[in-house]
Image (cartoon, rainbow, N blue to C red):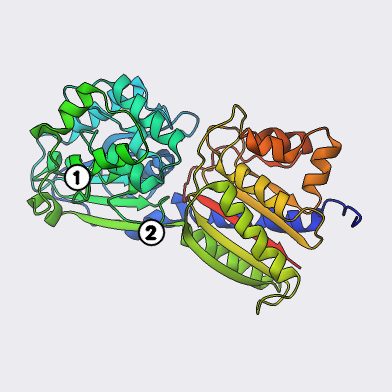
Amino acid sequence: MIPLPDRDDGARRFLRGCFDRAVEVCRPDRILGGHLPPPPAGRTVVVGAGKAAASMAAALEAHWPGPLDGLVITRHGHGHPCARIRVVEAGHPDPDAEGERAAAELLRLVDGLGPDDLVLCLLSGGGSSLMMLPPDGLTLAEVKAVNGALLRSGAPIGDMNRVRSVLSRLGGGRLAVAAWPAPVVTLAISDVPGDEPATIASGPTVPPVSSPALAHAVLDRYRIPVPERLAAFLASDAARPPAADHHAFGAGRFHLMASGLSALNAAAEAARTAGIEPLVLGDAIEGEARQVGTVMAGIARSIRQGGTTASRPCLLLSGGETSVTVAGQGRGGRNAEFLLSFALGIQEVEGIAAIACDTDGIDGSETNAGALADGATAGRARAAGLDPADRLGDNDAYTVFAALGDLVVTGPTLTNVNDFRAVLIR
């Protein structure tokens, strides 16, 4: 048997530095000022939702030259002090009553505005759940049941938001229509693969891309039961999205301020500065987290063994949003699950180390952003009395990395451009 290598602390420090740099360049206080429109003749009303919404609101207050007021909704624990914009903390990934009440207030804030007024909409990842306002005829409990089933199903975020945008009084362009004739300027930080505006926070300010039929098809695809009341709603006129040619969409503007690619490019520059060649694999990688981990481990082994044209040392960078089909009873988000699978694929191989984290600082619903691993991880887990393959089968990657002291804990980062994965091969 190959002797088990020690934990590679030097590689881990480098990888953590790359992650910190990736998060830093996507912070609202660094990027928002260059995307602002001129002040209007009338009022400026701020609305928005997402894990970065509060820090975006604070950055807006620091840069906006005139009066403004409004409301944004963020996840519990992700608040930020604001002087003029009210911040409400609500539930994520499961919607709650606080978010429902705040979303209703958002609609009231934009009602009755005129063409000389301006709505600034601040959107970031998590907005779909945070401003979930069920349509008439459905309760929050019913929408939460659908949302929870989607989260457990392994559905990618695009499919999830095809359903959410139909089940929300703000999604699918409805917020922009409610604000009309006031124009809406959207400032967005994307956490979705492909950065499609209609998918970010379920697209409340842009023309809809989903429909009741598409939502029903997604639920059928993932074998999610459609209760009678939900089926009746999807078949009703109330479920129809706004027309794509509505005047509200022509008057609006959408600015993408940061995305997963922004984070990956920053990490790539940090690698070059350190004399390591970065290979950016893309910011739209999806699929089951453990399967992506297995594939990435195979790529890393091939590079390490000289089986590719890539030269060493190199850094494989990727982003996007993997998914987890929950079958076990353990703890752990998609980044920990990816990384435990990756660790099994590189066990007892020297010269490979990796980090996988969610840039919002929260991996799933846990307290960590993600974790670190190398060729010693699987063996160290067994030495600690944990079988890594068994723990992976029980969706219990958090327990493994917590026992090894290899969790990455940042707290809320106040931004969100989705997953960040970096694999160092020397």
In the rendered image, the quadrant that contains the C terminus is: bottom right
- Quarter holding residue 409: top right
| Residue 81 seen in the figure | no
Front one among 327 and 138: 327
Q: Is residue 221 left or right of residue 21?
A: left
Left/right placement of residue 197 relative to residue 90 reads left
Q: Label 1: few (<14), some or many (≥20) within 10 Å?
A: many
Residue occupying the point 78% across, 38% down: 404
Give the CA distance from mark 1 to mark 2.
19 Å
Q: Earlier in the sequence, mark 1 or mark 2?
A: 1
- Is 412 situated left or right of 2 in this image? left
Q: Which residue is mark 2?
A: 194
Q: Which mark is residue 173?
A: 1
Q: Amino acid at mark 1?
A: Gly
The spot of residue 152 in percent (x, y) is 46, 33
Image location of residue 289, percent across then percent down: 55, 47
The foreground one among 81 and 23 is 23
